[in-house]
Amino acid sequence: MTWRWTRSRTSRAERAAGRNVASKPSNEAPRPIAELHGVGPAIAAKFKALGLVDEIDLLFHRPLRYEDRTRITPIGRLRPSTTTLVQGRVTHQEVRFGRRKSLLVVLADDSGQVVLRFFNFYPSQQRQFAVGNAMRCFGEVRFGPEGYEMAHPQCQVIREGFDPPLPDHLTPVYPTTAGLGQAKLAERILETVDRALNGSLALPDPLGNVQGLGTLADALAAIHRPAATANLDALIDGYDPAVQRLALEELLAHHLALARLNRARAKQHADSLIDNTGLVDRLLAEFPFTPTGAQTRVIGEIAADLSGTRPMRRLLQGDVGSGKTLVAAAAVAQAIGAGAQAAIIAPTEILAEQHRENFSRWFDPLGIEAVWLAGKVKGKARQEALEKLAAGAPLAIGTHALFQEGVEFDRLRLVVVDEQHRFGVGQRLALAAKGAEDTGRGQSRIPHQLVMTATPIPRTLAMTAYAGLEVSVIDELPPGRKPVTTALIRDDRRGELVERIRAQLAAGHQAYWVCPLIEESDLLEAEAAETTWEALKAQLPDFDVGLVHGRMKARDKQAVMARFKAGEIHLLVATTVIEVGVDVPNAGLMIIENAERLGLSQLHQLRGRVGRGSEQAACVLMFKPPLGELAKARLEVMRETTDGFRIAERDLELRGPGEVLGTRQTGMLRFRIADLARDADRVEQVPELARSLKRADVDVLIQRWIGDSEQFADV
């Protein structure tokens, strides 16, 4: 922590806070941060790294915590573990030489004295602490070798005859980034807040004192300049009326943007895909089992969408092992039966290969060959694939390579995206654009879209992040599937697990051993997959132990996975690369080490790799004690239930929507104030509130909270 000092003049932010807010307003539009006083290109880039581009962003940048600098505490009343403002005179200073060079300054008032300790200082700074100088210092009090002391406090020299005024509100401390000091960030934010409060900055307030939560100005003042008596826990945790007021407005803006997108879809057209060839029935007849009731219901919902001319945008949710792929195959068959092309895209080559294998097994007997396109497809093979797609080959399966430049389709009318939250917004738009056409009648023709996820989406999240999509849920597992039993075991019982695996393999079954890292790391206390692989090979010499991880070449990974699926590899040591897309019914045991490092959704996905046959399967979560509260809560949830939707709800509560969905990849789901777990009740209130707004109010709210990212709201 660096030491800094300031002279006795007050900062711009403090002067802004104290000046007359009744000055004549200019009602200016919000300015880009790069145009603000004292912000050059380099500093503007630091602001942008925080997601702060203009003055509106500054207003909604919430403090992490607050400091009380509204009163000076007599030095004689200091207590350890408190953060306090003191004022006194320097009575002594010296430089100590020992294990670390340090500057010690004694500051005293009429009630006592405190030691100020600095480990990083310059001679020019040292001179500011000349004996006799008056100082005002803010820092955390602790008990040290010299008595009460403050390490690296923030200090201000007080000129003779001038006693700078104290702020009349708590001092906010904001999230920042390397290269952007707290002082500069706070100064820009508080200046902008002052402009908003005195009318210099145009900030319409369509909602006013909505639901008794106060006005927009009230909320900004309470968040950035709370009174010394404010309930800080409520402010920080987001339950204060000021935070709730902003959260409600943000949720409303999100709802309005999605409603606008839905209206815009009236100008979009999709081809009606009616299977006149009976291909869907022929496909379903190929399966040696009857689809579950849930699968049959969802197939019907999707079939109705594809038969219409309104572009389908449907989210297919289903827990691991529920049979989403079969449902997707029926949709693909309907599109192909209507003479159209369909494309299936997956985020990893392992998952894409799994789809290629399944769809080839199902569609080859029907005379339909899948065109395969992934990053590893090069040269002549790639050129042949491109030519087939351009000529109208009915089925394409691959990775992100499908929407790269140079890939052209003849009549792409259905896009199926698996594990869609793993794709960036721009990628999903690019694939949909491959089948887009201008009809010339003021309408655009776009493909139907089916997006699938094995990560159950909590209802609150679905109402916001996916409010523009119809949702189908496969809420029934195939008959004969037994819930996976889950146990928690400390890592010092590793030997017992090896013996359990030995018994499992000797009985003719297979197993997984999952490690979160690929190689040894000094920073993370986790066993590396390579190290574990070597150890298990030595401990289980009678069995074939394989290894797969993300740094292997794609062909090597595929070769290992093929051998495991064929039963040639008995125990597979892997990183989380096997999280999705691996279907080996004979694998009945999974060990996940360092399970406390993984999120609930990831643990649930991994556990879903076992229990895919009729035998009872087990998952062992191995952890390194002691466990933190969050890690303990996650592991307990995994032990208590295999219900993916219950797990998803708890995941939302524990981690928040940005983590559950992948904030960077959800486009518009960058909530600055709202928290979908905390503000679920507000989500329910939004639709009625939206109906009361005028068109101009809608424009204001969407631009304020969403801006240019509106186009990404539901991709």
Image (cartoon, grey):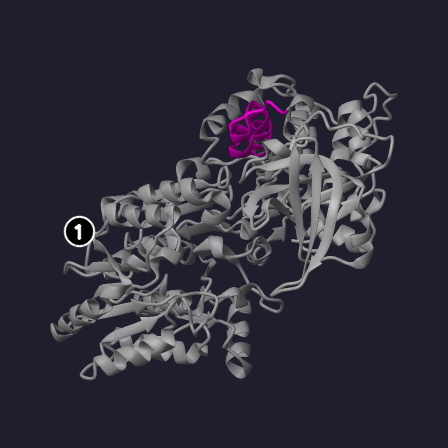
x, y percentage for residue 552? Answer: 44, 77
Between residues 153 and 510, which one lies in front from this camera angle? 153
Residue 677 lies left or right of residue 32; in this view the side is: left
Residue located at (44% from left, 51% from top): 451
Asked if residue 382 is among those painted magenta in the image, a careful observer would answer no
x, y percentage for residue 256? Answer: 59, 31
Count of numbered badges drawn on the protein: 1
- Can I make out residue 48 in this image? yes
Q: Secondary structure at mark 1?
A: loop
- Range drawn in magenta: 228-254
Residue located at (42% from left, 66% from top): 352
Q: Which residue is mark 1?
A: 479
Placement of 55 over or under 318, stated as above or below: above
Residue located at (31% from left, 54% from top): 320
Residue 687 lies left or right of residue 512; in this view the side is: right
Between residues 240 and 645, which one lies in front from this camera angle? 240
x, y percentage for residue 403? Answer: 56, 63
Placement of 104 over or under 572, stated as above or below: above
Residue 169 lies left or right of residue 493; in this view the side is: right
Residue 9 lies left or right of residue 691; in this view the side is: right
Placement of 406 over or under 248, stated as above or below: below
Q: Magenta-highlighted stretch: main secondary structure?
A: helix
- Can I make out residue 276 in this image? no
Asked if residue 237 is among those painted magenta in the image, a careful observer would answer yes
For label 1, count other residues whose C-alpha is less than 10 Å away and answer few (under 14), some (14-19) or many (20+): few
x, y percentage for residue 701? Answer: 66, 30
Q: Amino acid at mark 1?
A: Pro
